Image (cartoon, grey):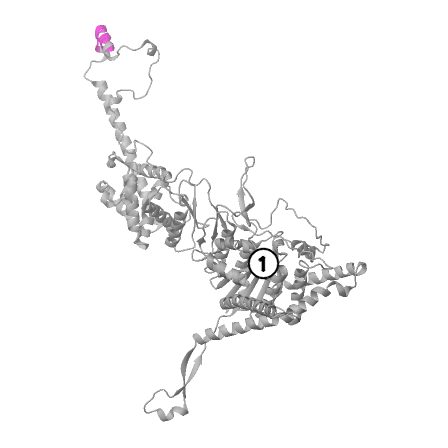
Amino acid sequence: MQRNEVKGNLAKLLATENLVVEHRQCETAQFDVDRRVLTLPLWDLATNDVYDMLVGHEVGHALFTPNRDWRVDVDCSMDYVNIVEDARIEKLMKRKYPGLKKSFARGYSELVEQDFFGTEGKDLINYNLIDRINLHYKQGADSLIPFKDEELEFVDAVGNTETFDEVLEVAKRIYDWQTQQNEEQKQDADDLNADNVAAAGEGGKKDLDEMSDEELLEELEQESPAKDPAQLDTPSYEEGAADKSNVQPQPDGNQGGDHNESQTQKSFDQLAKELSRPNAGLHDVAYVEIPKTIDLDTYITDWTEVHDWIDSQREDHIKQWESEFTPANVIYKEPDESYRAFRKSSNKEVNYLVKEFESRKSADAYARAGTSRTGVLNTTKLHEYKFNEDIFRKITVLPDGKNHGMIFLLDWSGSMSNEILATVKQLLNLTLFCKKVQIPFEVYSFTNDWYIAKNSIITGEPADRYHSFYHSSDYPNLNANEIYLDPMQFDLINVVSSRSNSKDYERMCLNLFREAFCYRNRCYYQPTVGMNLSGTPLNEAIVMLNYLIPDFKKKNDLQKVNVCILTDGESSPIGYGRRIRRDYEEDIKVRPGRVDYNQCLRDRSTGRVYKPFDGCWSHVTGTFIDQVKDRNPEVSVIGFRILAARDLSNFVGRYGSRETTYEEVQKQWRKEKSAIVPNPLSFTALYAIANNSLDDDFEFEVKDNATKGQITKAFKKMLNSKSSNKKLLSSFIGHIS
């Protein structure tokens, strides 16, 4: 498959356009002019020269052959038009890409040696003109194909064609000429046979009326040899049965076949099928594409709706629990006190982020700064005018920096239950940092559970926390060979946004904190309906970035966007529209299929075709990240992976590159309970964080009667914690500043 990818890239480069190339188990190359899809056979048995020649030929059709039904305008054999058009498009390809001349020459030379045109041992002069023209332009002039003087006019006309209309005109002329030649040859043969019959009848013999009975009997015995008795009662009544030995033999090559067909091209097409092994495409790759357009409102719920829903559900919850168990002011007392304590303690960390960011930003600006003369005299240097020309005031010019924005994707899955509160704390610190340095941001949690709340918001029906969802036979927004984003199984919840005032910002943070708090603590309340931890539609969230990023950039006038993904594991499988034909059904149906093995992701907007998926979950996620970065070059994707120590090796192996040294990562991990993965695959930056360290917030606290050793140990523990956290945060700031 690797060679197919290379040759596919060659085809796209040759075409100089957004051409889509597919490699499938098919007999011949095909080009869909409307969809701009070039389908190539696998050709796994072809040499590189032959492969390049075949690819160059098919790209020529893609570039120069128009999509029109010419048969309504010209009455001509298709073989004639195809051969003349082949000569034209190959000439144009060699003119456009001179390097292809060698590929065409070497490729056809190899195929001639293998007798792909079926001419070995045959006299070429006996072939129809269109066959010899085909050999002349594909084998080259050096092959010395024989032509009569009257035929050379047609050979030159083929070589001079520049437009498809000229191709049709020349092909029609050749076809009409060949038709006339064949009719004349047939007439000559009929006349010759008639003459032979007449000569045999005359033969110098006597007329029957002039012959005696003895002479007549002798003549009959000579002309009628003894026959098998079984044949005596089966006389022949064939017309023209008089002496077939005098009929001239048909020429070799076409063997009297229909002149509408090209024998050489027929042979070539048949043998070209054998360049692919029969089972080479046993598992044909399915090409899947990113959807062209997405209705953002279908999958994204804005923060105003999200928190209005949470507030309304909380009011109902308080009414229910207040009457039965405890006063209203107690239900949320513990999470609210914890939130206030968190906010107070996080100021130092956030201020450090701000300081680090501003410092790096200033250093970057200084490095790019320049000076220029103002044209205004510096009066303090006027006395130097005789020996110094530099007596003008100067100004430092600072180039404008790029406007940055942040998009956070938060994993709201069941496996995050133990780490969700600590992750939310880190996330809220990052959003507060963004607010202080005036970086626009959006926080989305990806989930399968929000549909319950969304349906209730839209319909006004009561929400059922224990709602179990089943698909009907109809799948909304499901298209063949497109990534499937199920609007009833995937949502992005906009939980925090910079598009808010200070009051609403605190409201969002507190609500999110409360939702996370109840998963780690015994509370008087349950998670809000629709906010339950669910599956991990991470890949769907990454695909959505293709539509989120342009919208986010446009609304905030941004040049660069940083995407932060906070998760603790691999994504759930993502689906695509799979074409299915059952034995008992005639129609092809489209049903959701799993993207996991032997599918190939392609992006029509960039022309990129990515390696086929091999069943590895990390490969699928990495490919979607690569696709987002390829479509959006100014986007950085930063990953925060929360994991246990036992999973570190597997994680580095999946997401690290060849330059990544596990020993280096492990050393940092053991010391700091976190690590920066060097040279990660797909991600711009990748951080591994121990799941048992997120809640570690070591302060210098000791008992009143603590010994000197206990005090020293507590102090070192505090310093190590602060140092480790600062290293990771410093690295993060370096990527976004």
**180 relative position to 526: left or right:** left
Q: Secondary structure at mark 1?
A: loop
How many circles with numbers are drawn on the protein? 1
Q: Is residue 305 at least partly visible in the picture?
A: no
Which residue matches tag 1? 691
Q: Which residues are magenta?
A: 210-220
In depth, the one of 354 and 553 nearer the eye is 354
User: Measured from the top left, where is residue 414 in percent x and y?
Assistant: 63, 54
**304 relative position to 35: left or right:** right
User: Measured from the top left, where is residue 23 in percent x and y?
Assistant: 42, 45
Q: Is residue 51 at least partly visible in the picture?
A: yes
In depth, the one of 268 and 131 nearer the eye is 268
In depth, the one of 554 and 595 nearer the eye is 595
Amino acid of disc 1: Asn
Task: Tell me if residue 357 comes above or below residue 133 in the rendering.
Answer: below
The image quarter in which residue 114 lies: top left
Q: Main secondary structure of the magenta part?
A: helix
For the residue carrying disc 1, how many other residues have a C-alpha within 10 Å: few (<14), some (14-19), or many (20+)? many
Outermost residue to the bottom:
383
Task: Tell me if residue 405 comes above or below residue 37 in the rendering.
Answer: below
Outermost residue to the right:
323
Task: Tell me if residue 78 comes above or below residue 490 in the rendering.
Answer: above
The image quarter in which residue 673 lies: bottom right
Outermost residue to the top:
214
User: Measured from the top left, where is residue 667 in percent x and y?
Assistant: 49, 60
In depth, the one of 268 and 670 nearer the eye is 670
Magenta region includes residue 603: no
Magenta region includes residue 213: yes
User: Measured from the top left, where is residue 689 in percent x and y?
Assistant: 55, 60
